[in-house]
Image (tube, grey):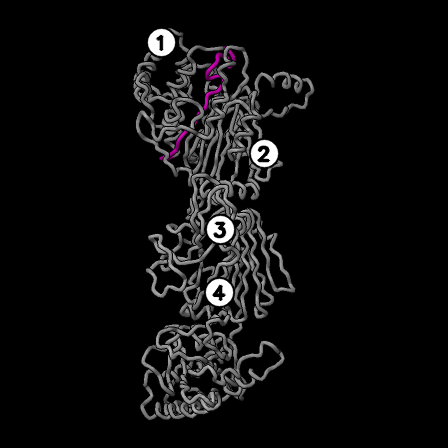
Amino acid sequence: MARIAHISDIHFGTTFNFEIWNKTKDEIIGLRPRTIIVSGDFTDDPDPLLLLAAKSELEDVCTACGPGTEFFIVPGNHDLLDLGNIFHPRSAKKFDHVMFHDTTNLRKNLESGLGFKLGLNRETLRWAKFPRFRRMRPRNWLWVETWSGKCDGRLQSCDYRRAGKRWPTHSIHDQTLITCLDSNNPVLRQFVFATGAIARNQIDRINAPGLLESCPCCGARTNGANADNGILLRIAVLHHHPMPIAVRDKSLDNQDAEARLEPFLILKNGGDLIHELQRQRFDLILHGHKHRPQFARVELRADDPERYPILVLAGGSTAKRDEAPSDNTLRDIATEANGRLKVRTFQQGNWQEDRDYREPLEVLKRRAFARAVERTKISAKEWTSDIVIDAVGHLRSLDKTSELRVRSRDMILPGIVSSVDLALHDTRLDVQVEGNSSVSLCWRDDSGENYPLGTPKLPADCCYWVNFQEPLRIGAEPLTYAIREAAANSIAMSQWEIEERAGRRGGAGNPDYGYEEVGSHISYPVEKLIVRVEFPPQLDGITPKLRCRRHPATPNFPLRYLPEQRPRRGQPQPTLLTDDDLANEEARVLTYEAHKRTWVLEIDQPVPGYAYSLQWRVPDTRANKKVCDRTLAYRDMLARLHNRSCGGDVVQSCQDRFNRLARNLMLRFHAGFDNQEQQTAFLMLYDSNNLCLQPALTSGPVPRGSYEVPLGGGVAGAAFLQRQIIAWKNDPNSKSLIKPPSSGALNSHWVLALPVFHQGGPDATGKELDTEPGAVLGVITLGSSSAASKISDCEPNEDDPTDKSGEEIGQEAQKLAQECVFDILNIIGKAGGNTDPVAPTVP
C-alpha cells in the first residue's frame, strides 16, 4: 500500500512561517509516508545554502518517518531564477550539486562550526542573511565537497545518473513509479517570465528509454527488467501547472488581475504533456507554482474506448505567512489495500475532513486493468462461466474465453493453464475443450512436456494445459474457445454433509463454514466477466451474495495461467482477502432470471487477481434430532458386524438373513438367459470417522481387494449421500458423474444401490421412511456382470417422464432392503440384551 506526502512551494525565506511548518512537519511524520514529494520552489532565490537547508530538513523528516522513506524533488522557477523570473547563471548546476550530490560531510562540518542543525529553522535563516563575504567560505565548501560527483545514495539521485543527468528521472518506490520533470524551459530563462514548458526531449523520454541498469556512481538501485510488476500508481511531478488554476476571488477586479497574470505562469505545452501522460497510463500529476490548491480529474481522450482519466493535483504553498490559510496545504496520498486511491488535505497542518477524496471504483478497475495488461501483455474480450448445479450437488460448467490476444511484441503465448479448483472430495472430473480446432487440451508436467488426457500414469504434479496449435503472438487472430468441466459431489446440499466433512468439529471461527460458493478467478485482464449459475429446485429461495476477494500479494498476484505460477493441489494456498466495497458496488448488477432459476452477474473490467464468486448458506434440512440420534445408534450396532464384536453366532445369523435378501434381489434382477452372469451383494456401512462406506456383509463372488468408498464416491457412496436409489450402468458414453473406485472393482456392468433409512419418525413407530440428511443407516448394493441385467428396469424412462414403473421397481427392492436391515438390527439388539447401552427399541 503506497503512502505519499506532497508539499510544494516551501519558499524558505523572509515570508516563511516556522510555526506552520513545524505543525506540517509533525503531521507528515505522524502519517509515516514512505514517499515525500516536493514539487519545487524550495527557496525565494537560487541560494545553494538555503537549498542545502531544505534538503537537510527533508533528510531529517525521512529519517523520522522510518526506514525506507525517500523524498523526490523537482526544481521550481525560484530555485533557478532570481525572484522567480530573472536569469541566474549556473543555477541549474547549483541545484544539481546540492540535491543530487553527497552533502553529508558538508552538512556535518557546517553544523559542527555553527553549533546548530541545518534545516528550515530560524537559526539557519538568520545565518543565511549575513553579508555576502560571510557566506563565501560555506559556498566554497559546497563546491569542494560536491566536486567529485558522488551521489548521496537517494533513489532519485541514482536514477538521475541512470538517466544521464537529464530530466525526467524515473524511480520505482513503494509500488509507485515517480517521474519527475523539469518544467523550467531553458529557452525562457533569459526572459523575465515565470512561464514553464516541458522540452520535447523530456516528453519523449517519459517512457524511460535508454536508462542505465544501475547508478554509474555507486552501482546501486538497479530496477531490473521486472521492477514494474508491482506498480500500483504512476505519478508525474513538475512545478508549473499544466492546466489553468481557477480564479477563487469573487471580486471582478481581482478576477481580471489574476486572469492577466495567468499567461505568465502557466505551462505552455500543458496539453501535450497531459495527453502523453494519459497515453502512458499515468494516474496523478502533482505540481505547485501558483500557491493555489486545486483538484481536477482530466480525460483528454474521452472518446477513446481505452481512455484513461488522470488526476491533476495542484499543491498550494507549504508555510507562507502572506498566503491565505487555505493555501498552505499538505496532501496525504495513499492507496487502500485494494489499490484504490484516496487523498486527504491538510491546511496549515490541520486535516480538512470535508476535502477528502476517494476515487470511484470505476477508476480503480480501469487502472487495475491497465496495470495487468502492462504486466501480462495479454487480454481477453470476455470470460463467460455458465454453471449448473443439479439436485444432488453435481456441478457442470462451461467456461468460454472470447478473443484472447497478445498485446506486446516481446510476448509469445504457447498456451495457458486451465485452473480447475476442486474440493478434495470431488470424485470425478471431465474436462473437454470446445469451439476451436486450433486449441487442444492435455496434461502438462513441470518440465513442459505434454501428455494426452487418457494417459494412465502421469508425473506427480501435472496440470490441465490448453495448448495452442500455433503460439499466440501480437497481430495474430484472437482465440476463442471453451472448457467444459463436470465434477461429482462438488457442492454440499445439506448442513449435515458440511458437518460430516468437518469431522463434526464445527466451523472453529471460520466465517465461511456452512456456506457454498462458485465463481471465477481472474488471473489476466478481461474486459467483461459474465457468471451464470443455475440452481436446482432444492435450493429455491436462496439469495446468493457476491464475494470479491483478492490475493494478498496484489498487485503482484501470481499469474495462475502460467505453469510455474499455478496453484498446486496439496500445497497450502494463501487466504484471499475480502473486498466488501467492491462487492457492494458490483452486486448492483447481480440479477435473477426466475424462469431459469439462474443468477446472472455481469461485470465490466473485473480486477485481475480477484476471485468473483456467489456464496450462499447451505439449507439445513436434516432429520429430527431424535431420528439423527437413533440413526447413529443403529449405525453403531451394525458396525459390530464389521469389527466382529458381537459374537460369531450373531454374525452368522445376520449373514444368513442378508443371504436371503441377496438371493431375492439376484433372482429378481437376473438376466435370465445369461448363465455366465455373476452377481454380488454388499451391505455398506458408513464410517463417520473416516468419511467412507465399508462392507459389513457380502454375498456372492467377491474378488480380493478393497471395497471401501468415500462419502459421495462410487455408486454406494453416491446413494448414501444423495439419499436416493441409483441404477448405474457401466457405459463410457454415459453422462453420469458416478464412477466406482478402481481398486477391487468387480467389473460390474450394472449396479443397483438401495439406501436404507431410519423409519417411523421421532418415535420410531410405523413404516414411513425418514429420508432427510442424517437418517441414512447404510446402503445395500447389487452388482451384475451382465449387460442384460434387469437392474435396467429401475432406470427412469427418459422418453416418458410420466412412466414411473422404474421408480416403483426400485422402491420394491428398497422395501426388501429395509426389512432385511431392521431384521439384522433385531438380531443384534436381542443378542445385546438389556445391558447393551446402545441398543435402541427397534420397530
- Under circle 3, the secondary element is loop
Circle nearer the viewer, 3 or 4: 4
Badges 3 and 2: C-beta atoms under 8 Å apart? no
Name which of mark 4 and mark 2 comes first in the sequence. 2
Residue 297 bears which disc, if any? 2
Can see residue 761?
no
Residue 522 bears which disc, if any? 3
Could you tell whether 114 is left or right of 251 in the image? left
Crowding at dot 1, Cα within 10 Å, few <14 / some 14-19 / many 20+, comes out as: few
Crowding at dot 4, Cα within 10 Å, few <14 / some 14-19 / many 20+, comes out as: many
Magenta region includes residue 428: no
Taking depth in this image into account, of 170 and 348 the one nearest to the observer is: 170
Type of amino acid under label 2: Arg
* Cα distance between the residues tagged 1 and 3: 64 Å
- In magenta, the rendered stretch is 66-86
- Under circle 4, the secondary element is strand
Circle nearer the viewer, 1 or 2: 2
* Cα distance between the residues tagged 4 and 2: 47 Å
Taking depth in this image into account, of 252 and 647 the one nearest to the observer is: 647
Residue 486 bears which disc, if any? 4
Q: Residue at x 52, y 79 (%)?
A: 771
Type of amino acid under label 3: Ile
Type of amino acid under label 4: Ala
Circle nearer the viewer, 1 or 3: 3
Examine the image and state in which quarter residue 676 appears: bottom left
Name which of mark 1 and mark 2 comes first in the sequence. 1
Circle nearer the viewer, 4 or 2: 4
